[in-house]
Amino acid sequence: MGSCDNCSSKSKCNSRSENGCDFIFPKYGNIKHIIGIMSGKGGVGKSTVTGILAVKLKAAGYKVGVLDGDITGPSMPRFFGINNKRADIIQVDKNQEIKFLPVETSLGIKVISLNLLTEEEEQPVIWRGPMIAGVLKQMYSDTNWGELDYLLIDMPPGTGDIALTIMQEFPLEGVVIVSTPQDMVSMIVKKVVIMAEKMNVNIIGVVENMSYVKCNSCGEKIRLFSKKSAKEQAQYLGLKLLEEMPVNSELLESMEDGKVESYISNSFEYNDLLDNFATKLK
């Protein structure tokens, strides 16, 4: 629980009770904007979009953190090339209250992930839903975030426990939806859109990933998965199109080489994502 004065969602809050706000707030630090990145389906690139948006915001001068909310399939440490590092855990008082110190990327983005808290990144999490939700809330509330302009939450796919927990208990300012250009994927993603609408969560817009491959010789956009444009798919979802992202081998190579932040921050690609995101939040 926490004070509504520090909540970015206080002007449109539907979660007040007689005892005050039902949202969970970080114990250590202050966060201006909390944004979820989600989809109805796995493998569409939520983590990639989270990482790109985090780097673009950081390069624009904002203080940024990333919470890897995909507890059973965390991938943000790999994206940023910090998977060999581990977050420090500090005992705060005699009651055994703990505080997590996030790992900072080369640009200074603060990241917390279960893969930064386990001994080995390949170690599986074999937990039931309530325990997963509890760990997620602890990672959010007990991390020393400091002063952040944006906390981006990389959410697991679907409309299950974690998505429900974040929408009900975190002071979300909005969510970014990620999809790919196939009718079957769009249908599944639509379920998440309807869920967000039912939960009165602001939807900032949709990013269509893997929209096309660009020919190196002529620059033509070759659409591999659908003849429909990204705008048509966005219209089906009833959302603003924030960006259509190509299949980008250079981005993948930069991730494998541990240079993804440099590649993204120095590239003119994905600028539409940042611009449309910022415009929609105003």
Image (cartoon, grey):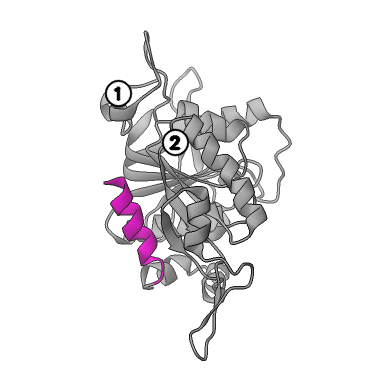
Residue 229 vs residue 62, the one in the foreground: 229
Can the viewer see residue 84?
no
In which quarter of the view is residue 78 placed? bottom right
Q: Which mark is residue 272?
A: none
Residue at image point 47% right, 48% down = 238
Question: Quick check: is 208 in the magenta stretch?
Answer: no
Query: What amino acid is found at the position of numbered circle 2 in the picture?
Result: Thr
Can the viewer see residue 199?
yes
Query: What amino acid is found at the position of numbered circle 1 in the picture?
Result: Cys
Q: Which residues are magenta?
A: 269-282
Residue at image point 56% right, 66% down = 228
Depth-wise, is mark 2 or mark 1 nearer the camera?
1
| Up/down of 243 relative to 133, above or below | below
Q: Tally the marks.
A: 2
Task: Name the outermost residue toward the top.
Answer: 18
Task: Name the outermost residue toward the bottom.
Answer: 217
| Magenta stretch: dominant secondary structure | helix
Local secondary structure at mark 1? helix
Q: Which mark is residue 4?
A: 1
Q: Which residue is mark 2?
A: 143
